[in-house]
């Protein structure tokens, strides 16, 4: 019923929203311990704290690529002891994997408010997702199954073809 309600809000079909869920978080909303699914992206964490959390970027390597080599959960725990607010900002949250720094576009004053809202249930994650995509103006791409346009805005320009294919 949550997916149906979200689809009605956007004006799209339910399979379109479920497709994004499968691509973004393999259909999961929460980790096995009951906490909100998340992915720490250390390249968005303040650069002055990188050494404190063990984030090393090799010569000539893009910081986002360096973050792919890491266990993000272990680094998230270390980073939380340095600056919890920055961790929330630099992580993607819930099944729709909304970055903390996109909290305003998802309808929240702070990343912490967004995370707390998402922790209350899967339906809340769908609410944040629908607010984000309508706020970004990509609801039409979702309705029209224009996966290239959707992926370009939602995931960035780096792997548009791969996300659209999936």
Image (tube, grey):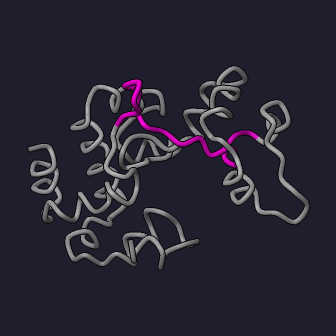
Q: Residue furthest top?
A: 81
Q: Is residue 71 magenta?
A: no
Please state the horizontal and vertical placement of residue 136, each as a whole percent of the image.
Answer: 37, 60
Circle count: 0
Q: Is residue 83 left or right of residue 138?
A: right
Of residues 66 and 117, the one drawn nearer to the viewer in this rendering: 66
Residue 166 drawn above or below residue 5: below
Residue in view at x 71 percent, y 52 percent: 69
Please state the horizontal and vertical placement of residue 105, each as a whole percent of the image.
Answer: 40, 48
Residue 117 drawn above or below residue 159: above
Quarter containing the C terminus: bottom left
Please state the horizontal and vertical placement of residue 144, each as a whole percent of the image.
Answer: 21, 77
Please state the horizontal and vertical placement of residue 133, each as a whole percent of the image.
Answer: 32, 57
Residue in view at x 69 percent, y 46 percent: 70
Q: Is residue 144 left or right of residue 136?
A: left
Residue in view at x 28 percent, y 63 percent: 19
Residue in view at x 50 percent, y 44 percent: 92
Q: Which residues are magenta?
A: 30-46
Q: Is residue 1 left or right of residue 53?
A: left
Residue 41 drawn above or below residue 154: above
Quarter containing the N terminus: top left
Of residues 104 and 155, the one drawn nearer to the viewer in this rendering: 155
Q: Residue furthest front?
A: 32
Q: Is residue 44 magenta?
A: yes
Of residues 29 and 46, the one drawn nearer to the viewer in this rendering: 29
Q: Residue furthest right?
A: 59
Residue 155 drawn above or below residue 109: below
Provide the major secondary structure of the magenta segment. loop
């Amino acid at each position: 019923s949550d997916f149906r309600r979200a689809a009605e809000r956007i004006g799209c079909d339910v399979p379109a929203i479920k497709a994004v869920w499968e691509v973004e978080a393999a259909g999961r909303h929460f980790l096995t311990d009951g906490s909100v699914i998340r992915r720490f992206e250390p390249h968005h964490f303040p650069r002055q704290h990188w050494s404190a959390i063990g984030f090393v970027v090799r010569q000539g390597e893009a910081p986002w690529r360096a973050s792919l080599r890491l266990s993000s959960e272990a680094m998230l725990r270390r980073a939380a002891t340095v600056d919890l607010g920055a961790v929330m900002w630099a992580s993607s949250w819930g099944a729709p994997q909304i970055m903390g720094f996109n909290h305003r576009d998802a309808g929240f004053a702070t990343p912490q408010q967004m995370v707390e809202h998402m922790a209350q249930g899967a339906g809340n994650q769908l609410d944040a997702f629908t607010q984000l995509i309508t706020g970004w103006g990509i609801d039409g791409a979702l309705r029209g199954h224009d996966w290239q346009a959707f992926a370009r805005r939602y995931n960035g320009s780096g792997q548009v073809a791969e996300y659209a294919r999936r």
